[in-house]
Image (cartoon, helix red, strand yellow):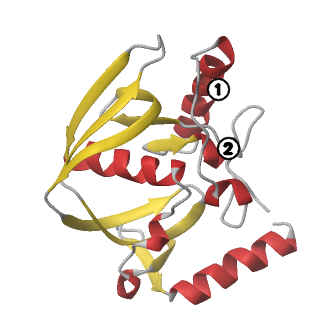
Amino acid sequence: MTEESGRDITIVRYGHPALRQKAAPIRRVTDDVKALVGRMVEVMRSAHGLGLAANQLGVPRRVAVVEIDGELTALIDPQIVSAKGSESLEEGCLSLPRLYGNVARPTRVVVRARDLSGKRIKVTAEGLLARALCHEVDHLNGELFIDTVDESTLHWLVGMAEEGEQITQATTLEDALKAFAASGRAGG
């Protein structure tokens, strides 16, 4: 299986058991937890992602990072405590590369968590940040965007045209999951 790489850690792909595992809470913010967050940020940035949950590194711990417009948010034990509105927009996932589809998410959320110093924080987010936080908290609960995607919008990104437009190919969820299973068995 080809994986997005960080220095010494890789993003696991669909089919890895950690992606469907509910992440364990962090009891104390230790140096190991801080090091995990540092690796997560490095891997997320090298993969050109907006967010990453520890599950995606095969580590089922309740840690997530999100970076929107250059602002990095690291969250320990995040929980969505309030959600309002709804908007359906295209999403993808680093653990399901090149697969995209529309997912309805709240337009505004409030997330409670702890920061890297262990201090309790509350993040109020709208728009893309709210969407990214929901996506990452779903990961920590063992859920993927394909669980709530509008299946009629699923497509593969297969390339880019010279004009900069995306070249896509419609797919079904069943066919997409078969493709991920086949790539995992084939070893790449």
Task: Tell which of 170 and 115 is nearer to you.
Answer: 115
Secondary structure under tag 2 reads helix
Res 164 visible: no
Whole-percent x, y for residue 153 in the image = 36, 82
Residue type highlighted by circle 1 = Leu
The disc placed on residue 36 is 1
Picture quarter with the N terminus:
bottom right
- In the image shown, does 116 or 45 lie closer to the viewer? 116
Tag 2 residue: 57
Kind of residue sitting beneath label 2: Leu
Q: With respect to residue 170, does 51 lie above or below?
A: above
The answer to whether 9 is drawn above or below residue 142 in the figure is: above
- Quarter of the image holding residue 152? bottom left
Crowd band around label 2 with a 10 angstrom C-alpha radius: few (<14), some (14–19), many (20+): many
Q: Is residue 108 left or right of residue 89?
A: left
Marks 2/1 in contact by CB < 8 Å: the verdict is yes
Residue found at x 58% / y 63%: 97
**In the visual, does 46 lie left or right of 116?**
right
In this rendering, would 142 be left or right of 74? right
Which quarter of the rendering shows the C terminus?
bottom right
